[in-house]
Image: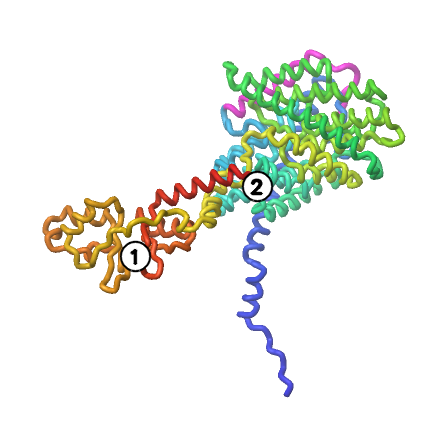
Amino acid sequence: MFRAPRLPSLNDLAAFARLFEFRAVSRWVGLGVLVGIASGASAVVFLVMSEAVRHFLLDDLANLKMLEPGGEGALFPSSASGAPRAWVLLLVPAVGGIVSGLLVRVFCPEAAGGNEGFINAFHRGRGRTRKRVAVVKSVAAALFIGSGNSAGREGPIAHVGASLGSMLGEAFKLSDRERRLLLVAGAAGGIGAIFRTPLGGALFVLEVLYRDDFEVDALVPAVLSSVVAYSVFTLVFGEGTIFLTANEYPFDPRQLPLYLLMAVGAALVGVLYVQLHHRLARMFAQLHIPYALKPGLAGLAVGAMALVVPQALGTGYGWIQEAIVPTGVFPVAWPGVLALLGIALAKTVSTCISVTSGSSGGVFGPSVVIGGMVGGAFGLAFHQLFPALVVDPGAFVIVGMACFVGGVCHAPISTLVMATEMTKGYDLLVPIMLAEVVTFALMRTSTIYPAQPATRRDSPAHGGEYVLDVLQDIRVRDAFTPGPAPVSVSPSMSLPELLRQASESTQAIFPVLGEDGKVQGVVPLETLRAFFYDEDIAKVAVAADCMMPLVAVSSEDTLATALARFASSHYRELPVIDDDRVKGLLGYEELLQAYSAELVRRRLES
């Protein structure tokens, strides 16, 4: 007999919807879109401000025409011609440093530096930043970078975007965890927009939070925010990449040993770069002069360097463009190798001086230049030695900047993606992968960001999760040592007798056994003391009057279960009951000792 198919009911549709978590997804889509719009707009404003400052101070006042990356170009066409004004070029970075340092010192000290700000806010600030961070960071960084100091845009815009995400989290009264995720999403939007790397920007902020781990929980909001922010940014400035490259870079497996050698060289330079960065940071911290003068002193040093090596100024993306697709600015053959290495050295020194002085600026952009120059030097040298094998040295520039930044920032996966997005150099995926692995492995103990915890387990943001993770692997039987049966009492035992038993024992609780031998409840010492202070009740009270509800564990329970029961009962000990018989008492101190021992064991194994 034919039956018409039953139409799905509302309950069926609701059950089906729950399979896909539509409510959670739609909520995070909405939040991701909001953060993306805010961080994308902030990236637009920040880029315009920093370029306007640079155009006024360096182009107009210092009469310095700087090289621009081919894909980005200049927002404000340069009118500079002839020789630069040396005395202006010397002083402009110092003035920019002083004004920027004053803004940071007076209004928002946590706006100093680059990515360290948002990394600290995520791990140690519960995802919170002050509302003024976004404004102060934007203005201070625009002045500092625009005046020619060697610092990058990614640190400031990541912190600005993170601050906007944090503010949205506060406005919607989100939990600490959700606010942290929005903070990361904001940073991803800022970086994805200003570098035009929507996927790489999202992955970078997830990876840069740790030395050897990945903040996978934030993947969805970070990608959503980065995509939206990139879309907002391209609506204003158009689609494209920062750098123009050759049409293609054919893959030749015979080149892989050369890329490996280049990666080793990049790692050596990276270690020196990180060590110099940390030493200068300590030196500036110990320098007993007014805070705002420190960035000014750094700017004066950068200005003096620029009189000899103009490439020491600014982010230096134009010089990377020249190394990728030469137009004749650099000398050729072996003098060109020395020139590229000289720029890498000058950029290393000027960047470390600038970003450690206490003003606002990141290390990502200058690190791209340093890595690209090192890679370009190797590529040009290999081109001289093996001209038939290495036809285009520009390929080594792209691979060098990817592996160098991946090594110093401990972000090998995201920088691989960012390098291909910034250059469309997808033909170089295999050599970039090889170089990233080698550089990252050689620099495992060196990072430019001291605020990075090693793993999620070491982060205060995930501390509680990993306590339970460890306790889930330990059984109660492993944490307590069975000994003589604990002192038990009957429900009818008088209070004086119960006090006598307690005085002769070290137990914190006393199981109350019924006539059938089963545990009916427990008498904690704290309850017993409360009865003791009332003399009238003490004369007539029995154990049943002092008895509290039974909260116990079995020897097969995990310590995570035991911890939850300690928290719910507030007892200092729990009876361990198997087959209706008390096998012993598990103390809270024993649980902590077992947890500590397991942590030590795991650390020794790793």
- Which quadrant of the figure has residue 206? top right
Residue in the picture at 75% in, 23% down: 66
Query: Which amino acid type is marked by label 1?
Result: Leu
For the magenta stretch, what is the residue range?
A: 78-105
Q: Could you say which is closer to the camera, residue 36 or residue 276?
A: 276
Q: Residue 81 magenta-drawn?
A: yes
Q: Could you say which is closer to the camera, residue 497 or residue 448?
A: 497
Query: Which amino acid type is marked by label 2?
Result: Val
Q: Is residue 224 above or below residue 324?
A: below
Q: CA distance from mark 2 to mark 1?
A: 45 Å
Q: Is residue 372 above or below residue 477?
A: above
Question: Does residue 554 show up?
Answer: yes
Which one is in front in this view, the residue at disc 2 or the one at disc 1? 1
- Image quadrant where one finds the C terminus: top right
The residue pinned by badge 2 equals: 184
The residue pinned by badge 1 equals: 550
Q: For the residue carrying disc 2, how many other residues have a C-alpha within 10 Å: few (<14), some (14-19), or many (20+)?
A: many
- Which quadrant of the figure has residue 141? top right
Rendered location of residue 187, percent (x, y) = 59, 39
